[in-house]
């Protein structure tokens, strides 16, 4: 049974006519659909397609320009990992300090974390950084730094985990280990949304995909979304994007669209990618 209008089911994140952007210029627009509790969802698209913007909107870092994000879970249930180049590695922190930040919601930012040292060390061990706790973060390799950030995510213990290009600039072994951790989280019923550029990784490990090109191209099972025509359309839309365009009027989906697949809808309409039955109907 669908939730009442204006609400969303427990643990779900529903996007209703969502437009996000900066200085009133849209970077993602006309996005409808539901991220179900327990989804393992990849965000893919050309460079500048709006993947990072969408993640920032989901975590509440940027406001909606239009539409809504309806959350079936409190903000504290969401953990967010930005791109590595957005984090200042020159700041004088040890690996232990960085990982411990994942405990702040539970322990409090101004309370002593000494009583949680065992949990922090266990998280570091889980990501292959046992014995690294005293190392300054500025001395870590790209892969080691990303492992430390994943240790912080472990300690956040969130139901929803948002990852922005988590494998960029890391070695193959680290990528394999972090994918294994993501799959473990998914097996525990957590919701994972990851912006990725490696379509091979997406096809191998992510059953659901949202293909963006500033607007939704397709959303549904990965094999269907990552079709040649959909990828070509995403490239065309990205190349034609007007950075100075104002927010445009939203087209309204027809009731008949509810029963149609993403592939059919994306073929017929320029402005929408209505979720398949697995994700519910358009908001």
Image (cartoon, rainbow, N blue to C red):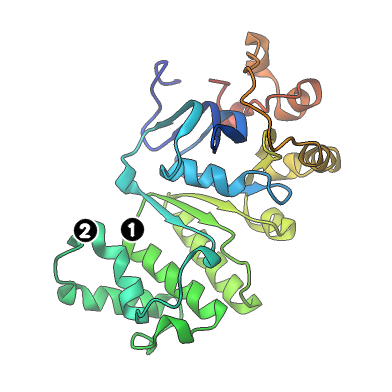
Q: Is residue 255 above or below residue 74?
A: above
Quarter placement of the N terminus: top left
User: Which mark is on residue 106?
Assistant: 2
Q: Residue at x 42, y 15 (%)?
A: 5
Q: CA distance from mark 2 to mark 1?
A: 10 Å
Q: Secondary structure at mark 2?
A: helix
Q: Residue at x 71, y 47 (%)?
A: 45
- Badge nearest the viewer, 2 or 1: 2
Q: Residue at x 37, y 67 (%)?
A: 152
Residue 281: x %, y % from top left:
57, 21
Residue 199: x %, y % from top left:
73, 56
The disc, 2 or 1, on the residue closer to the chain's N-terminal end is 2
Check if mark 2's residue and mark 1's residue have beta carbons within 8 Å. yes
Q: Residue at x 66, y 10 (%)?
A: 254
Residue 255: x %, y % from top left:
63, 9
Name the residue furthest top.
255
Quadrant for residue 154, please give it. Answer: bottom left
Residue of label 1: 157
Q: Secondary structure at mark 1?
A: loop
Quadrant for residue 168, please give it. Answer: bottom right
Name the foreground residue: 102 vs 264: 102
Q: How many marks?
A: 2
Residue 81: x %, y % from top left:
47, 59
Q: Relative to residue 11, is residue 16 drawn left or right?
A: right
């Amino acid at each position: 049974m669908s939730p009442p209008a204006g609400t969303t089911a427990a643990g779900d994140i529903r996007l209703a006519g969502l437009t996000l952007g900066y200085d009133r210029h849209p970077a993602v627009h006309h996005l409808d659909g539901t991220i179900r509790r327990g989804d393992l969802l990849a965000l893919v698209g050309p460079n500048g397609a709006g993947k990072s913007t969408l993640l920032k909107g989901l975590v509440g870092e940027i406001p909606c320009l239009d539409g809504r994000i309806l959350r079936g879970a409190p903000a504290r249930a969401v953990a967010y990992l930005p791109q590595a180049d957005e984090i200042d590695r020159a700041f004088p922190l040890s690996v232990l300090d960085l990982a411990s930040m994942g405990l702040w919601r539970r322990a409090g930012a101004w309370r002593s974390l000494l009583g949680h040292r065992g949990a922090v060390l266990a998280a570091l061990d889980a990501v292959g950084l046992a014995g690294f706790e005293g190392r300054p973060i500025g001395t870590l390799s790209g892969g080691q730094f990303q492992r430390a950030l994943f240790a912080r995510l472990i300690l956040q213990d969130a139901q929803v985990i948002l990852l922005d290009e988590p494998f960029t600039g890391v070695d193959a072994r680290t990528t394999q280990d972090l994918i294994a951790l993501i799959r473990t989280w998914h097996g525990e019923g957590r919701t994972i949304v990851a912006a990725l550029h490696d379509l091979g990784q997406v096809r191998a490990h992510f059953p659901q995909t949202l293909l963006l090109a500033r607007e939704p191209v397709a959303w549904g099972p990965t094999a269907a979304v990552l079709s040649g025509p959909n990828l070509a359309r995403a490239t065309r839309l990205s190349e034609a994007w007007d950075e100075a365009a104002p927010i445009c009027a939203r087209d309204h989906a027809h009731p008949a669209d509810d029963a149609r697949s993403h592939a059919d809808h994306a073929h017929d309409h320029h402005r929408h990618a209505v979720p398949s039955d697995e994700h519910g109907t358009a908001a």
